Structures are given as structure tokens and as C-alpha cells.
Image: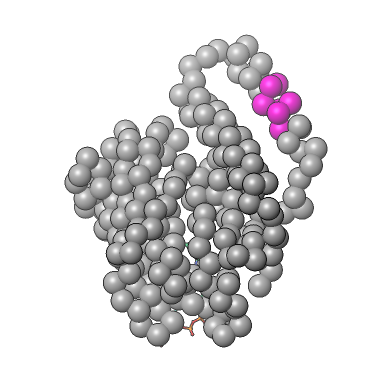
Amino acid sequence: MSGYIQEDIDPEELAHRSELASSIAGSVRELIDATVRTEVGEADIAEARRLIEAATEILRKDQLPGAYGIRFNTDGTKRSWGNAVLGRRNPIAPPIELHHGAEFSWTEVDLGAAYEGPAGLVHGGVLALILDQLLGSTAEFQGVPGMTGTLNVRYRSATPLGRIRGEARVDRVEGVKTIVTGTITRDGKVTAEAEGIFILPKWARGEVSDVLRKSVGEG
Ligand SMILES: CCCCCCCC/C=C\CCCCCCCC(=O)SCCNC(=O)CCNC(=O)[C@H](O)C(C)(C)COP(=O)(O)OP(=O)(O)OC[C@H]1O[C@@H](n2cnc3c(N)ncnc32)[C@H](O)[C@@H]1OP(=O)(O)O
């Protein structure tokens, strides 16, 4: 399947590129938050736009032809740096780091003004976005990956903006389907629950090498 790219990079060089990617994405995230919350006047907006356009032009000097895709080293570590939820190059992604334990996976992340839905509360779609990735990555880490077939989310109570925790575990595996459950908590209170069915697609069954199926790494 296209978009999966074998690209071996020396670990030291990779660490350096990873740092660069995170640093620029962090700066743009700051810019997004500043944009949502700014109260400055027209002249400052015009000046900010001029500077942003200049920065965009610098970045456009050398671009990939399309999306980043998913890249692998031969040791199986992988990079999903364009991913909308945890791509370290992607400022649209909340700054999520996933952690995987034997029993469950988890993440803690600060969701600020850019993730608002109802006043002062996290947008439900953003919670679903985070749950989708967290549950999917949990299945993948356990060696039973799949594409999201179904994701059910029950929003039990409102989730105020701020630091949230997500947790997920594989509930069971039924053939090509992996059923994963998870929660979002805010201040120790569960505000959303999810169950996802992750399905190993036909194209991946028997055709995709183990290094791709069982690879672990940065999301
Ligand atoms: C190189 C890697 C190798 C591994 C490949 C895994 C890839 C993922 C890897 C890493 C993930 C990391 C984390 C992910 C997080 C983010 C996830 C996303 O954003 S995914 C994008 C959104 N989702 C889609 O775009 C799916 C679109 N739908 C499809 O592609 C197909 O419909 C698919 C794959 C879901 C099923 O199609 P079929 O043709 O492969 O499967 P059939 O043989 O028809 O069904 C198999 C079983 O699944 C049930 N099933 C089919 N569709 C279902 C559904 N939507 N919900 C529940 N069950 C379903 C069927 O009833 C059947 O069950 P019975 O075995 O008979 O018990």
C-alpha cells in the first residue's frame, strides 16, 4: 500500500530531525493558540500576517510532494510525523505522547483554547479523535493492529479544557477484529468512554510483512 515508506535513517540523525520537527510544530501550535486568543488591532494583525507569510515562504523552499506517509527504519521503528493526532511535525495534532504498558496504554495532554467546543469545554470530536488514535495504537502495540471499523463514544459528562488523561486496553481479539476499550478522565473523573473495533484490512492480511504489522515506535 502506497504511503508506507522504508527509509532508513541513522538513529542520531533521526533524533536530530525529530527534535527539529517537534520544535517547529510547537512554535506553530503557540501561533494557533495566540491566534485564537488575540485581541490586538488591525495594524498588528497585518504585521503578524506579513511575518507568517514570510515564514511560510521559507518552509515552502523545500517540500515533500504530498503527505508525509508512514516511514519505517529496517529495525521496525516507525514515524507517523504527519499524523493528525500525534504527528510530531503536525501542529494540528494535540501534543500527544502515547505510553504503552503491558496491560494498558495511556496519554496525558493539555488541551487549550484551540480545542474548544461548548464554552470552556473540549470539543467532542477532539475527544473522539484522541480516543480513535489511542485505542488504535493500543491494538497496534499489542500486535493486533487494524483500521477503525467502528468507534463508539459515550460522553458521560462535560470535559473542561485543560489536562486530560486517556487510557485504553485491548478487551478481546476476534479473528481479524480487535476490540479495544478506553476512557478520558479529567481531574480523576471519567468524562468519556469508548469502544472501538479495529479490523486488519483484507489488503494487509498475509501480505504485510511482520516488520510493518508489529512495528512499534512513535505512533
Ligand atoms: C502496514 C500496517 C499493517 C497493518 C494494517 C493496519 C492499519 C492500521 C495500522 C496502524 C493503526 C494505528 C492506529 C490507528 C488509529 C487511527 C485509525 C484510523 O484513523 S483508520 C481510518 C478510518 N477507518 C477507515 O478508513 C476504515 C475504512 N473501512 C475499511 O477499510 C474496511 O471497511 C475495513 C478494513 C474496516 C473492513 O473491511 P475488510 O474488507 O478488510 O473486512 P471484512 O472482511 O469485510 O470484515 C472483517 C470482519 O470485520 C467486520 N466488519 C467489517 N466492517 C466493520 C465495521 N465497520 N465495524 C465493525 N465490524 C466490521 C465484518 O463483519 C467481519 O467480521 P467477521 O470476521 O465476519 O466476524
As for residue 54 lying within the magenta part, the answer is: yes
Q: From the viewer's side, name the closer residue of 79 and 11.
A: 11
Q: Please tell me whether residue 120 is drawn above or below residue 213 in the rendered image.
A: above
x, y percentage for residue 9? 69, 55
x, y percentage for residue 91? 55, 40
x, y percentage for residue 5? 68, 64
Residue 130 appears left or right of 40: left
Tally of numbered discs: 0
Q: Please tell me whether residue 29 is drawn above or below residue 155 in the rendered image.
A: above
x, y percentage for residue 93? 50, 45
Name the quarter where the N terminus is drawn: bottom right
Which residue corresponds to the image point at 29% horizontal and 64% vertical from the top-left? 103
Q: Please tell me whether residue 109 is drawn above or below residue 169 in the rendered image.
A: above
Question: What colour scheme has been applied to the protein in the rendered image?
Answer: one colour
Residue 90 appears left or right of 140: right
**Is residue 25 visible in this depiction of the protein?**
no
Q: From the viewer's side, name the closer residue of 18 and 174.
A: 18
Q: Please tell me whether residue 200 is drawn above or below residue 52 in the rendered image.
A: below
As for residue 71 lying within the magenta part, the answer is: no
Residue 184 appears left or right of 48: left
Find the magenta span and give its range.
Answer: 50-56
Which residue corresponds to the image point at 52% horizontal and 58% vertical from the top-left? 217
Direction right: furthest residue = 61
SS assignment for the magenta stretch, majority:
helix
Residue 24, by quadrant, is top right
